[in-house]
Amino acid sequence: MRDNEGLIFIGIVWLIVGVVCLLGAIKKWKFLVDPPEKYWFFYSPSWGKKLYGKEALIPLNYFFGIVSILGGAFFLFKGVKNIFY
């Protein structure tokens, strides 16, 4: 039962991360689409801005949001499936 709880938790966390990335890209939240470059060494959107420029952050947030939602759905499905089978 403990493995299922871990998979469900991971799935929920990744779903939340994906939704935040997508909403941030849609609503143009500053901390995701225009972060300060001085935090590049520990904040991945700042690192992306430093490497690819501000224009690339919106498509990158869409990409990471979709990938996170798909990954979260996979882990959530796997955890819930293990409970019933």
Image: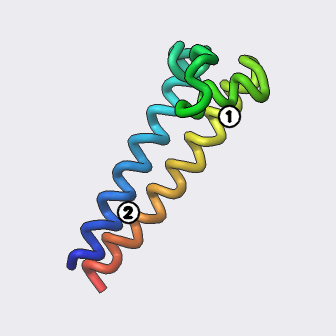
What amino acid does circle 2 point to? Leu
In terms of secondary structure, where does tag 1 sit?
helix
Residue lying farthest right?
52
Give the quadrant of the N terminus: bottom left
Mark 1: few, some, or many residues within 10 Å (few <14, many ≥20)? some
Q: Position of residue 5 (x, y in %)?
A: 25, 68
Asked if disc 2 and disc 1 are in contact, CB closer than 8 Å, the reply is no
On the picture, is 36 further left or further right than 48? left
Q: Position of residue 27 (x, y in %)?
A: 52, 16
Structural distance between the alpha carbons of marks 2 and 1 = 24 Å
Query: Given this view, does label 2 or label 1 mark the residue nearer the observer?
Result: 1
What residue is pinned by disc 2? 76
Looking at the image, what colour scheme do you see? rainbow
Which of pointers 2 and 1 lies earlier in the amino acid sequence? 1
State the residue at coordinates (32%, 80%): 82
Question: Against 26, is 66 above or below?
Answer: below
What amino acid does circle 1 point to? Leu
In terms of secondary structure, where does tag 2 sit?
helix
Q: Locate residue 44: give its quadrant.
A: top right
Residue 60's tag is 1
Q: Position of residue 80 (x, y in %)?
A: 31, 70
On the picture, is 79 further left or further right than 66? left
Question: Against 81, is 22 above or below?
Answer: above
State the residue at coordinates (43%, 65%): 75
Mark 2: few, some, or many residues within 10 Å (few <14, many ≥20)? many
Q: Nearer the viewer, residue 13 or 84?
A: 13
